[in-house]
Amino acid sequence: MKKLYRFTIGLLVAGLASAWAFDASANYKEHCARCHGEDGKGKTRTGQRLGAKDYTDAKVQAALKDADALKAIKEGYTDKRSNRRVMRPTEGLSEQEMKDLVTYMRKFRKK
């Protein structure tokens, strides 16, 4: 009986983790990939025009704090040098979905 219980709990946890990964991935593709690229490198036409950072770069990842990334998702981002809005706020996502986007983006980092 204990084995069945552990197996059931294991399936539940795996299912939830899989659902989270799908939601974060789907949200990234819908809201972020156009500029940041599906690979996080920012090498899309729009990303290059707007100066999107390469999130596979460990130095870029280290310089970006989670709170700043979350703020950019919520409020958009204005380039301080040019004072030009380069990222609009992401709409239609819950606070948790925005946090999940930050976590998902961190997975692009190469060592």
Image (cartoon, helix red, strand yellow):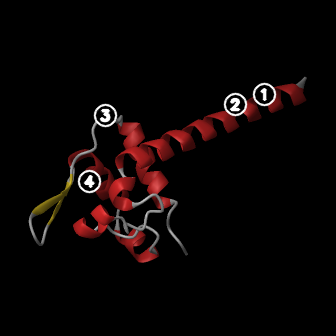
User: Going 44% across and 63% down the picture, which residue do you hit?
Assistant: 40
Q: Which residue is mark 1?
A: 8
- Helix, strand or loop status at disc 2: helix
Q: Position of residue 88 (x, y in %)?
A: 21, 49
Q: Which residue is mark 3?
A: 92
Instruction: Please name which of the two marks, 1 or 3, marks the residue nearer to the observer.
Output: 3
Q: Amino acid at mark 2?
A: Leu
Instruction: Please name which of the two marks, 1 or 4, marks the residue nearer to the observer.
Output: 4
Q: Position of residue 4 (x, y in %)?
A: 86, 26
> Which disc, if any, is residue 12?
2
Instruction: Please name which of the two marks, 4 or 3, marks the residue nearer to the observer.
Output: 3
Q: Residues within 10 Å of mark 3 (few under 14, many from 20)?
A: few
Mark 1 → mark 3, Cα distance in angstroms: 33 Å
The front one of 42 and 78 is: 42
Instruction: Please name which of the two marks, 2 or 3, marks the residue nearer to the observer.
Output: 3
Q: Position of residue 8 (x, y in %)?
A: 78, 28
Q: Amino acid at mark 4?
A: Ala
Q: Position of residue 81 (x, y in %)?
A: 12, 72
Q: Amino acid at mark 1?
A: Thr
| First reached walking from the N terminus: tag 2 or tag 3 | 2
User: Going 39% across and 44% down the picture, which residue do you hit?
Assistant: 30
The front one of 25 and 73 is: 25
- Helix, strand or loop status at disc 4: helix
